[in-house]
Amino acid sequence: MLKLWTTIITTISITLFSLNVCADELPKMTDLSKNQKAPFTGTLFNISAVAQIIAETENARQQCSLQKNYIEGKEKAKCDLAVNNFQANLTALEQKHNSILEIKNEEIDRLDRIAIEKPNRNNHWWFAGGMVVGIVTSVVIFYAAVSIPK
């Protein structure tokens, strides 16, 4: 990673520096033979040096592109993992909800069947017992209330 940043910074520095140097005059290029005088002042590169500069520049571009693709792929994989985890959690919660809902509905149906099969036919006895207990309680309370002042 450090090598990539060093290459990027070097490439940008060379590009910016060369733009400032060349800003005064247009780029010139000529072929020279051995012992021939250069028609202008400047730096002379042989074919190997120019090829090396071009190759290094292209190599830096490719490294930058590869690094960018690697980082994009890694981040996309992280994103896909998070989405898949949330989807799995959602699916699990939906299944849990459906299971609980099914159990609840089955229990309601079971209790309905029990209520229909065995109806409570003793309602009148409960009513009569409640009336008797209420009357007896009232009489006892009345008797206690009358006896206490005497």
Image (spheres, helix red, strand yellow):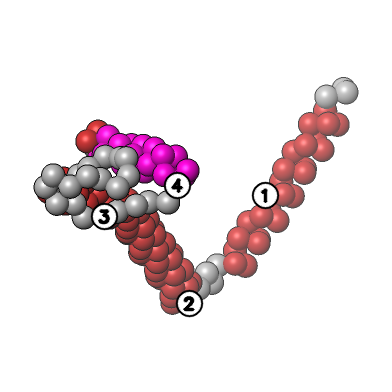
Mark 3 or 2, nearer chain start? 3
Report which residue position mark 3 lands on. 30
Give the spatial CA distance, label 2 vs label 1. 30 Å
Amino acid type, residue under disc 4 in the picture: Glu
Residue at 83% over, 24% down: 148
Looking at the rendering, in which quadrant would you find the N terminus?
A: top left
Mark 4 or 2, nearer chain start? 4
Mark 4 or 3, nearer chain start? 4
The image quarter containing residue 114 is bottom left
Nearer-the-camera pick, 11 or 54: 54
The circle drawn on residue 116 is: 2
Cβ atoms under marks 2 and 1 closer than 8 Å: no
Amino acid type, residue under disc 1 in the picture: Val
Observer-side mark, 4 or 1, equals: 4
In the image: residue 34, left or right of residue 109: left
- Local crowd at mark 4 within 10 Å, few (<14), some, or many (≥20)? few
Report which residue position mark 4 lands on. 25
Residue 35: x, y in percent? 13, 44
Tell me if residue 109 comes above or below residue 63 in the rendering: below
Mark 4 or 1, nearer chain start? 4
Give the spatial CA distance, label 4 vs label 1. 119 Å
Amino acid type, residue under disc 2 in the picture: Ile
Report which residue position mark 1 lands on. 133
The image quarter containing residue 92 is bottom left
Q: Helix or strand or loop: what does disc 1 sit on? A: helix
Q: Which residues are magenta?
A: 4-25
Residue at 63% over, 56% down: 129
In the image: residue 6, left or right of residue 135: left
Amino acid type, residue under disc 3 in the picture: Thr
